[in-house]
Image (cartoon, rainbow, N blue to C red):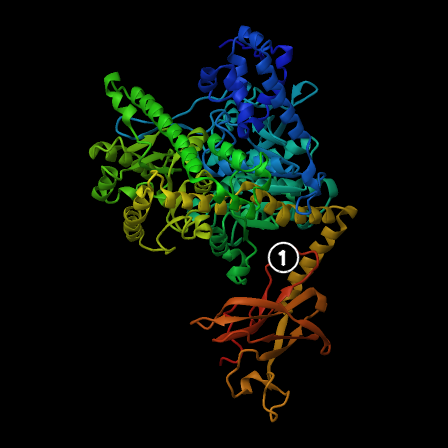
Amino acid sequence: MSQVRSFTVLPVLPEPLKDLDLIANNLYWTWNPDQAGLFEHIDSELWKSCGHNPVKVLASVSQEHLDALASNEDFLAEVNRAADKLKDYLSKADWFDRPDVPSKKALTAYFSAEFGIHECLPIYAGGLGILAGDYLKSISDLGINMVGVGLLYQKGYFRQYLNIDGWQQEAYTENDFYMMPVRLVRRDGEALTVSVELAGRRVSAQIWRVNVGRVRLFLLDTNIESNKPEDRTITSSLYGGGRQMRIKQEILLGIGGFRALVAMGMEPNICHMNEGHAAFMALERIRQIRQAEGVSFAEALEATSPGNVFTIHTPVKAGLDEFSVEMVKRYFSGYIEHLGLSEKDFIGLGRVNPSDNNEPFMMPVLALKLSSFRNGVSRLHGQVSRRMWSDLWRHVPPEEIPITSITNGVHLKSWLSEQMNELYERNFAPDWQHGLIDVDRWDAILQIPDEQLWQTHQMAKDELIAMSRKRLKTQMLRRGRYHTELNWADEVLDRDALTIGFARRFASYKRGGLLLNDPQRLVKLLTSDKRPVQIIFAGKAHPADEYGKQIIRQIVNFARKYKVRRRIVFIEDYDISIARTMVAGCDVWLNTPRRPMEASGTSGMKAAINGALNMSTLDGWWAECYKPGRGWAIGAGETYDDTEYQDMVESKALYNILENEVVPLFYNRSDDNLPREWIYRMKNSISSITPLFSAKRMALEYSRRFYKTGTKKWRYFNTESMSRAKALSAWKLYMKQSWKEVQIKQVEVFVRTASGASQQEGEQKVPLAEYQKELKVGTELNVSVLVKLPGLDPDDVTVELYYGDVNSLGAISEAKAERMNYAGTAGGRYHRFTGNTYCKSAGRKGLTVRLLPHHPDLTDPYELGLIYWEGDFTGKARKTEPVGSK
């Protein structure tokens, strides 16, 4: 093709409509229906055909129509109200006075490979991206100073359609960025670019900006003329290509993303990595500090790690993001020297065991090692993550491994149906959402009349059925069905039937076909004349996941084979728009992951806030949320080695719950045909789940526990020429060199007689090993420890009593640790520490002693990987035995 000169043409908005451009280019409208309604008012059919994209609507509507709207007083009043609302929202900053939110001057950068904000910006694949989108919206509502960093994909994630056999097909459509609510970042009129090194060549990326309320989201794009053809496709598709493409994208996201912030004059205090895709960002922070301050890698690590937060989403090692050592060397050959590391030490950063040459380079390991704050995304996932990564802290008891948990939440206004929002506004105050996380305030839901709540839910259900029928017709036409065969689509689904929703990624562990395990039993439920059940499925399988595709095919063909296609519908090309309608209109939300494979899950939260009742295995968020009366639990939280047996057991449990509890409860009606008991459970579910599982609560928790603390420490280490970071680095090195000589030389445990002891015993201390009686609840134990600290100060260590119940293997479990007091020198390099504890409960108990490094600037005592247990003379951890048990 001959040379093409490209340029951008923008619509001409009449002066009275100028604010439409401001509104269209801030995704605040995605969670404010009155704002989005402006563009639907312009042309409702155009709004639908443009994929609910206001920028495209403004570019597509005729100039004559715009001119006519400019003289429409009612429409102008709507525009002015919407613009005033947005401007007022953008100007507010009242949350910065909260004690649990960092100050306005503190900047947090949130890195994610995908962001699911709205269907008009298709740069998301599933739950990870939807969570990131909800998070940015909640951060915006709170007014926290944050920017998002990601990639702008030319083709996004694939579009799904099924062939006539029900087999998933993938299609990719190109995004037209100039018809989307994104804008190029420019400097002096030219697009601002940053570059990264990829296997010896330089690749550039331009930066796009998306306004998400008060949050700015910056997205990198390599499709520019200065790049080679193969490099222009780096940001072509989300999770597309093989390992080579993935490492290029992750270098661009982490290293290029951080460089983009610096290029725009931003220096974040906190960098939050949403999964390990952005872990290279932590290396770039270190490189830039080294270059600016002339410090070592270790010193730069001390200065940056307090400002790094890593959120883990993957619950199994099979799903890790990893690269071969050869590939990492190829892409970082010129980068390693700037870090001041040897090639071996660099590779070791991505390995659990740096000396194991068979280990690949794992991105989560890199993020874990370079961050001071780490968390799973539900309480159960935190436990799973601590076990999963226990080898990184080999001597530390599992419950003390420094990976905590912050359970995910959802952005309420993004997922609440318009009908339910209006119901709340009628029965609560118009600003009811300001009390969103106030648990007590949600008790007011119980006062809403049953008939109002049920009618509201039924309206959302009607929308779901209408959407399902319309999409089903479209799907049939595309497969080549005759128009005469489409009539039955108008009879699919029944507003009075119990409607179950199942919509999520079709990965094997999510078991999308579990409900089909007993066909005859399921058909009986579906075809009942008096109490019918219907199911709506939606979701995509990864293009390479043949098993996931087979499950989808099984569902489609099941409906045909058993002639239940009016009761089972599969909606193709699952996206945010479909999800909003489904979570609002379903009666029951079904989730069937194999425990503990679901890190969190949020779709059930979205359904719950709309009044749907959850039915799920006790995994992810449901494991900590479930209580009788809120929904139903499939199984009792068991785990199995035999997955086929697990599927059989839990599918039977699923049928039993449906037949004996769910269906009877739904169809048990009062004289006015209302399911009163069902509605009571709806209210109980809404009031208990909504405040606890909101993204607002999640954002405040991150701010309080990580951002505020991390910002304070980041500033502490990055002032006074980084003197504190340098001092801590030197202290750590000295501790590692000296630790091999540290020893617990003597531990003495005495029984102090409890009150009421005989006069003959008095107040004497008797050595535990010599005590001839059973200890009683309330007995005090006094412990004295002699510690050898060659070249170390007593303040350099913490000596702790570690005590608790003793299990059948003789090890302490459910332990508590209590710091002992320094009691003075015992001559030369020996020091004594003392402490005491009480026998607070009956049973077999154990007590031991341990040493940990101590420094006031440590984020946690396990940073150095040093821990010394009583009886350890080899430098290796041993099983903790109860004192006096031998």
Q: Compare residues 546 and 24 and report the one nearer the observer.
A: 24
Give the number of marks: 1
Residue 747 shows up from this direction: no
Residue 318 shows up from this direction: yes
Q: Is residue 31 left or right of residue 632?
A: right
Q: Compare residues 222 and 612 and report the one nearer the observer.
A: 612
Q: Quadrant of residue 194?
A: top right
Residue at the far top in the pictured view: 64
Q: Compare residues 666 and 538 and report the one nearer the observer.
A: 666
**What residue sits right under mark 1 in the picture?**
860
Residue located at (54% from left, 10% from top): 3
Q: Is residue 69 above or below residue 414?
A: above
Q: Position of residue 189 (x, y in %)?
A: 68, 18
Q: Compare residues 11 and 125 and report the one nearer the observer.
A: 11
> What residue type is disc 1 on?
Asp
Q: Is residue 722 left or right of residue 542?
A: right
Q: Position of residue 837 (x, y in %)?
A: 60, 74
Q: Position of residue 464 (x, y in %)?
A: 38, 30
Q: Secondary structure at mark 1?
A: loop
Mark 1 crowd level (few <14, some 14–19, many ≥20, 10 Å Cα): some
Residue at the far right in the pictured view: 720
Q: Is residue 712 above or below residue 15?
A: below
Q: Quadrant of residue 738?
A: bottom right
Q: Is residue 833 above or below residue 521?
A: below
Residue at the far front in the pictured view: 671
